[in-house]
């Protein structure tokens, strides 16, 4: 074992250029980072120090930098994270433009609520369109909607419906959508409040995800800390400790706080705002400024690293904020590896998402199961 602690941080949706098969997904030409750079000047000294720009133009940097390509036929959060931890999804999750009426009827029967919406929509837009109905009915009627992802989402006013009731409804929806005809990757509770006539989504979102189709790297590690929605994404499997984040800034501060903790294992962080707040809403400036806020905190993280720490920065898919529609984009993602004891400064050829999990297993001397994909990034173990 070379590294006592590995910190793997996922910048949710931070793609670095179209994947080789992007055309099959309608994403030929997508480039989350490249297009943000083309629209605005970004101050990212620490990301560039670790080799982010070296993925585009050969230049000096610290550590090991490479792109990763997803093997599975998807571009969503669950499949991306599971594949990072060694388990690709061979068959994409079901996506609905609207849900069948027999599901809606069963959901209404079991929850004693009426549901409206039932279409693919932006969460903020559908609240503006139908939120007044939830208010007028005192939460007896709820908004249900989906997106380009395999999700069923239900809105609820925290101050009228209450979080407990929203979570109960979503738990019933999760049970129903385990049935094959209606099976979705995630059921998401979307709580909100109203302030000065504006619908404001709160940080009490809850994701009820499918369990991974096979044990992942997390199940094999002796100790894993999950920050952000990591525990939700893996349905709690393989998580020793879990910490909910209210924002990406908060999640990064929680990760920095973990640097003061003595442990041997993995700290796995998801920073969701890049995707949820800016990518899906096609907000280029918002995405760019979020990157700059992250870079400041990354600088603080780097200063606190111990000699036997390893940092792996990566992503789970793309979400180009300049792209048409509101869907994720099929892109390669960055993999920036840094340690104080890592004296090799190289840019490597494109690898696989599974290389992240394989690297973690190799470090902790754990045999990689045959069904897992990926190869260790050997350069981080060389002197």
Image: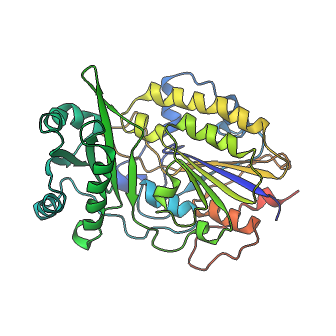
From the top left corner, tell me how far across and down residue 360 is, in percent. 69, 63
Quadrant housing residue 239: bottom right
In the rendered structure, the answer to whether residue 69 lies left or right of residue 297 reads left
Give the residue furthest to the top.
Answer: 196
Q: Residue at x 46, y 63 (%)?
A: 235
**Where 126 sits versus 308, above or below?**
above
Q: Residue at x 44, y 28 (%)?
A: 284
Quarter of the image where the C terminus is located:
bottom right
Of the pair 332 and 176, the residue shown nearer to us? 176
Q: Colour scheme of this structure image?
A: rainbow
Of the pair 334 and 98, the residue shown nearer to us? 98
From the top left corner, tell me how far across and down residue 352 is, in percent. 59, 61
From the top left corner, tell me how far across and down residue 209 is, in percent. 40, 60
In the rendered structure, the answer to whether residue 12 lies left or right of residue 138 reads right
Tag count: 0
Give the residue furthest to the right.
Answer: 383
Quadrant housing residue 221: bottom right
From the top left corner, tell me how far across and down residue 188 is, in percent. 34, 51
Q: Residue at x 14, y 64 (%)?
A: 106
Q: Residue at x 37, y 37 (%)?
A: 323
Of the pair 204 and 333, the residue shown nearer to us? 204
Is residue 90 in view? yes
Quarter of the image where the N terminus is located:
bottom right
Is residue 148 in view? no
In the rendered structure, the answer to whether residue 276 lies left or right of residue 260 reads left
**Where 246 sits versus 96, above or below?**
above
**Where 134 sits versus 27, above or below?**
above
């Amino acid at each position: 074992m070379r590294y006592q602690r590995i910190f793997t941080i996922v910048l949710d949706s931070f793609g670095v250029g179209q994947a080789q098969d992007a055309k099959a997904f309608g994403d030929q030409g997508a480039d989350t980072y490249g297009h943000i750079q083309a629209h605005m000047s970004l101050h990212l000294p620490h990301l560039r120090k670790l080799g982010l720009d070296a993925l585009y133009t050969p230049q000096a940097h610290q550590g090991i930098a490479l792109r990763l390509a997803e093997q599975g036929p998807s571009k969503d959060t669950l499949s991306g994270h599971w594949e990072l931890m060694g388990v690709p999804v061979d068959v994409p999750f079901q996506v609905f433009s609207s849900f069948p009426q027999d599901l809606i009827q069963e959901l209404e029967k079991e929850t004693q609520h009426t549901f409206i919406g039932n279409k693919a929509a932006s969460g903020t837009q559908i609240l503006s369109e139908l939120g007044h109905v939830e208010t007028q009915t005192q939460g007896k009627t709820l908004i249900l909607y989906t997106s380009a992802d395999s999700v069923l989402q239900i809105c609820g006013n925290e101050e009228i419906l209450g979080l407990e009731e929203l979570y109960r409804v979503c738990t019933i929806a999760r049970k129903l959508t385990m049935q094959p005809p209606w099976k979705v990757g995630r059921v998401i509770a979307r709580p909100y409040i109203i302030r000065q006539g504006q619908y404001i989504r709160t940080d009490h979102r809850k994701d009820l995800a499918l369990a991974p189709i096979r044990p992942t790297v997390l199940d094999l590690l002796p100790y894993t800390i999950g920050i952000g929605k990591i525990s939700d994404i893996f349905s709690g499997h393989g998580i020793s400790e879990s910490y909910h984040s209210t924002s990406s800034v908060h999640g990064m501060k929680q990760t920095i706080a973990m640097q003061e903790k003595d442990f041997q294992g993995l700290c796995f962080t998801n920073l969701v705002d890049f995707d949820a707040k800016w990518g899906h809403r096609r907000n280029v400036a918002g995405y760019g400024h979020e990157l700059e806020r992250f870079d400041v905190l990354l600088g603080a993280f780097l200063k606190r690293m111990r000699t036997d720490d390893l940092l792996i920065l990566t992503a789970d898919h793309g979400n180009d904020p300049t792209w048409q529609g509101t869907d994720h984009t099929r892109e390669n993602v960055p993999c920036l590896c840094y340690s104080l004891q890592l004296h090799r400064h190289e840019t490597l050829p494109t690898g696989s998402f599974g290389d992240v999990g394989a690297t973690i297993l190799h470090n902790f001397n754990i045999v990689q199961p045959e069904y897992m994909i990926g190869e260790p990034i050997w350069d981080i173990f060389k002197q």
